Amino acid sequence: MSFSALTKEELARVVGKEKCCRLAELAALVKMDGSLFLGPGAEATLTVGTGSAAVARKIFSLFKELFGVQTKVLIKRKNRVRKKNLYQVRISPQDGMARILCQLGMMDERGRLTAGVPGVLVRRECCRRAYLRGAFLGGGSVNSPEGTYHLEIITGSAEHARGLGRLMEEFGLEAKVSVRKNWHVVYLKDSEQIVSLLNIMGAHTALLDFENVRIYKDMRNQVNRLVNCETANLNKVVDAALRQVENIRYIAATMGLEKLPPPLRQVAEARLRYPDASLRELGEVLEPRLGKSGVNHRLRRLDEIANRLRRGEL
């Protein structure tokens, strides 16, 4: 099971403490995955579809608890290859359907369908948390922290997407909204903000798993950066030492080391004896001892002499 599916399984078990929170969560689920069919006599049938059995059970329970309506659960095979099921929670035409749709924010008092986030249902902070949880259960997904950090909620309404973005902003999250084909996507890409949203929705186990992987991943990246930095520095030291040995041998073959000033000759002979030594180690074998900058200065003078010899200036 994917990390996203495990997160939804956990959120499907979260139950709002207050009736207003449960109503807000159900409203989000209906807004995300609900379909309204009008019969010949203007009789309304409401169907809410989901690919998760846990989410279907939650929708069924919320409808029964909040409204006491007659509800059916239908199971359809969605894909023959992957053998996934599609669960449909269906509320057949019955008395009080218009009242239910109004309470869920799908219809206003005049009987017109609404598209955005029903403001009356998200006045309290606990209800806003519940609405975001329902929206994620209805059309959300989150990548495993092993890969790229990405959490998104997909909805078919631009107005609803903007409303979800504003709800996240009220919790200090910088949600972005984009269009993907005919869908509107509300997404987060910052790992800290994804963790915050998981906490807001109540997915605490998923949050801990996400944090553990994220910390391990960050430490692994930091170690890799340090190793790469050390490797690059080591390569620079080795390349410089090889160049210095080559120049010193060229000086010895052309003019002879005995013609060098004593300080330069001392460093040149030490480099030939210890071709792999660092500048600090090279300075410690000299008499008297010499610091790293002093050794580097003398080796640079030896490089200049070798280059002048190659150009015929000496």
Image (cartoon, helix red, strand yellow):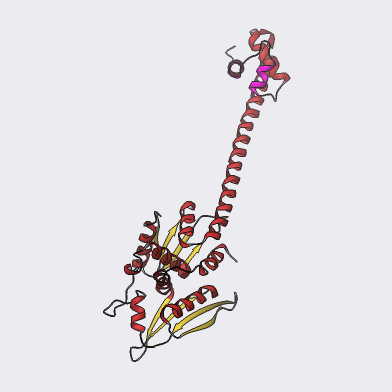
- Identify the residue at horizontal 43%, vertical 67% (top origin): 135
Which quadrant, please, contains the C terminus? top right
16 relative position to 308: left or right: left
Is 289 magenta? The answer is yes
Q: Decide if residue 135 is in sight here.
A: yes
21 relative position to 228: left or right: left
> Toward the viewer: 144 or 312?
144
Which quadrant, please, contains the N terminus? bottom right
> Toward the viewer: 113 or 260?
113
> Toward the viewer: 156 or 92?
92
Q: Decide if residue 253 is in sight here.
A: no
Residue lying at the far bottom in this picture: please name it: 41
Is 275 magenta? The answer is no
Q: Is residue 136 above or below residue 149?
A: below
| Coordinates of residue 225 in the picture (x, y in percent) | 58, 40
| Coordinates of residue 212 in the picture (x, y in percent) | 58, 52
85 relative position to 111: left or right: right
Q: Which residues are magenta?
A: 278-294
Residue lying at the far front in this picture: please name it: 18
Q: Is residue 19 above or below residue 235?
A: below
| Coordinates of residue 194 in the picture (x, y in percent) | 48, 56
Task: Tell me the quarter of the picture where residue 229 sits.
Answer: top right
- Identify the residue at horizontal 49%, vertical 55% (top origin): 195
- Identify the residue at horizontal 26%, vertical 79% (top origin): 110
| Coordinates of residue 312 in the picture (x, y in percent) | 59, 15
